[in-house]
Image: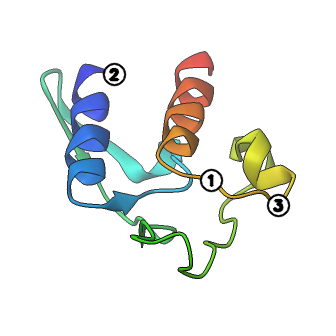
Amino acid sequence: SYQIAHVLAYLHKKGLLLRTLDPNSILIEDEKQINMIDLPCIAYLPKTITAPKLTPCGPHDRRSPEMLQNLTFDCKTDIWSFGVLLNE
């Protein structure tokens, strides 16, 4: 989980948002290394308030409350998805 959190922090620094975190996208190479693959929902975070709103992506059971209510969402959506993953 520590490595996944670092990947999320790195992507967010680069202005990227996963929108959903699927366990099938996480490969465990050995006990100390993970790789993330097949990230179909990745998107750039809007830089301005007038930028087009991102569309929800991923299965409903992994979407944040903001996505489900069709509200504006940001990096917190990835944290929600990470929490769902940890809960599994």
SS of the residue under disc 3: loop
User: Height in image: 59 above or below 88?
Assistant: below
Residue 1, numbered label: 2
Against 83, residue 10 (above or below) is below
What mark, if any, has residue 6 been given in the picture?
A: none
Query: Hey, what amino acid is under mark 3?
Result: Asn
Identify the residue under disc 1.
73
Residue 65, x across and y down, in percent: 78, 40
Residue at position x 87%, y 52% in the image:
69
Q: CA distance from mark 3 to mark 2?
A: 28 Å
Q: Which residue is depicted at the point 17% across and 21% down?
A: 31
Secondary element under disc 2, as helix, strand or loop, is loop
Q: How many marks?
A: 3
User: Which quarter of the image is occupied by the N terminus?
Assistant: top left
Mark in the foreground, 2 or 1: 1
Q: Which residue is mark 3?
A: 70
Bin the neighbour count of mark 1 within 10 Å (Cα to Cα): few under 14, some 14-19, many 20 and up. Answer: some
Task: Name the one closer to the observer, 50 or 21.
Answer: 50
Would you place residue 30 above or below residue 38 in this image?
above
Residue 7 image-quadrant placement: top left
The Cα–Cα distance between marks 2 and 1, rounded to whole angstroms, is 23 Å
- The crowding category of the residue bearing disc 3, from other C-alpha atoms within 10 Å (few below 14, some 14 to 19, many at least 20), is few
Q: CA distance from mark 1 to mark 3?
A: 9 Å
Q: Earlier in the sequence, mark 2 or mark 1?
A: 2
> Do labels 2 and 1 touch, CB within 8 Å?
no
Residue type beneath disc 2: Ser
Q: Position of residue 66 (x, y in %)?
A: 75, 47
- Amino acid type assigned to the residue bearing label 1 in the image: Phe
Instruction: Please state the horizontal and vertical placement of residue 88, each as a whole percent of the image.
Output: 62, 22
